[in-house]
Amino acid sequence: MKTIIEPFRVKVIEPIIMTTRAEREGYLRDAAYNLFLLKAEQVIIDLLTDSGTAAMSAEQWSALIRGDESYAGSASFYRFEETVRDIFGFKQVIPTHQGRAAERILFSTTCRRGSVVPNNTHFDTTRANIEYVGAEAVDLPVPEFYTPAVYHPFKGNMDTQALLDLIERVGADRIPLVMLTITNNSGGGQPVSMENIHGVKAICERYGLPLYLDACRFAENAYFIKLRERGYAGMSVKEIAREMFSYADGCTMSAKKDGLANIGGFLCTNDDRLAQQEKDLLILTEGFPTYGGLAGRDLEAIAVGLKEILHEDYLQYRFASIRYLGEHIARAGVPIVQPPGGHAIYIDAQAMLPHIPQLQFPGQALAIELYREAGIRSCEIGTVMHAGKNPDTGAEMPAAMELVRLAIPHRVYTQSHVDYVIEAILDVYQRRESIQGFRISSQPEFLRHFSARFEPVSGPEATEKIKPENQMQFA
Ligand SMILES: Cc1ncc(COP(=O)(O)O)c(C=O)c1O
């Protein structure tokens, strides 16, 4: 059969509340044009994130009943630990309430003021946790990463020459660890090849640096390797995942992605001494090392989810449905990050709305318009999320790309939902010249995209160009 179907049946349903454009206009104003501030019931199709939004399977719901809620030594922990060890292969497995808690503990124990942490591209919470301890987060993606329309089978790769240059420039003693984010979420959900992981590991070994994987979407990355990298077609996704992790000294993981769980994460390492320091910190803020901020039932759901994500029928269907969305809108002219990623389609808002200056947030403007048009919630990954600062003037500088991410929750939406999304994007695309930019009226110090308030920009200001000295430079 050529038709790839959802390899699951629906057992429990959740109604969607349909809204009118006039109602959505009001909701937008009440939320200060920040889609994170909408109520979920005001959203028709929620593509804000694939994180924690998965529909759990019957096996996962059954496992919840098995959850052992003992404070110490819970049987659920040992089942969780066994599954994580089996797939990831690390000695020490430390549960945390989600990925960012694993990041905070890792960077608090390994970094100090002046440390430098390279990554292909840091996710926003990873960057924020590094900067919070006074260290510097450096992105070293391959050059193709910055050109959305360019096809590269492993656009998430790290630029290994840039890593060598960085180590030579700042000195290995300032680098506590090197990270690779698989897949590379901030730039299109693009995979990292096994060759690149291996190459980065070789450099790390030469300088005595540990390599960590940000493993949130490890199964999607492994499936891309199976499909695209020579020599892996005959291996199972689990075998590929094990090889990826065999090159690493540890990982951070948000089980809300490829753990198919609604909450949870973990931190792994092969270093027993470091693990002890991490567990000491864990007790301070997350909990005892056999639950780490999670209920026993959450650990059970993760243990089952980690096995289910390795089912290749499921990964084949997931990639096909995401490609279907990407190909349909791209064929009609909508600029997207090519090729489609593993968990999301990313629209290139800068190419679609060239009349909106970057400091008026074309990605935010497009995300707002998709909500206004059809109640679709997406996520800006551009200057709202990743603005820089001019070191001399302190002025805000635009991000490298202005993307809008349409992340597909696991096992939640069907083909007709995707068709609805395609129709809405194409309608908005037809009248793209009428869309206007936004300005920020208030914002917090960190991670502003979650709570900043926006207002529409109109009049002469709407076409104001960015001053050259505020343009971000990318090496
Ligand atoms: C690549 C990556 N790393 C880390 C995180 C943080 O995980 P969490 O949301 O569980 O804290 C995310 C979440 O979206 C992510 O995509």
Image (tube, rainbow, N blue to C red):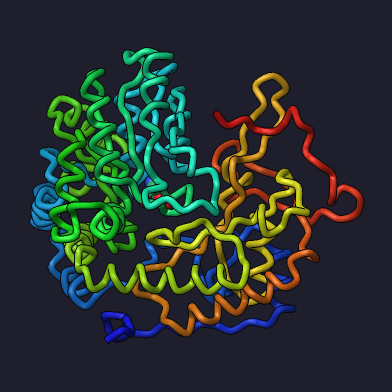
Q: Quadrant of the C terminus?
A: top right
Height in image: 139 above or below 416?
above
Q: Quadrant of residue 410?
A: bottom left
Query: Taking 285 as reference, is 469 left or right?
Result: right
Identify the residue at image location x=42%, y=14%.
170
Above or below 192: residue 10: below
Please state if 405 lies on the left or on the right of 426 as rendered.
Answer: left
Q: Hey, which residue is sitting farthest right in the picture? A: 460
Q: Residue furthest front?
A: 230
Is residue 135 left or right of 348 when viewed as pictured?
left
Residue 42 sits above or below residue 125 on the image: below
Q: How many numbered discs?
A: 0
Say which residue appears at 47% left-offset and 29% top-offset: 131
Give how far across and how far down residue 95 sits, in percent: 22, 46
Q: Is residue 113 above or below residue 189?
A: above
Instruction: Find residue 58 and report its horizontal and vertical position in percent.
Output: 21, 78
Q: From the viewer's side, name the closer residue of 4 and 10.
A: 4
Question: Residue 76 at x, y = what percent?
Answer: 12, 57
Q: Position of residue 145 (x, y in %)?
A: 48, 44
Q: Is residue 48 visible?
A: yes
Q: Is residue 296 visible?
A: no
Frontmost residue, 285 versus 55:
55
Q: Residue at x 13, y 68 (%)?
A: 66
Q: Quadrant of residue 285?
A: top left
Q: Quadrant location of residue 302?
A: bottom left
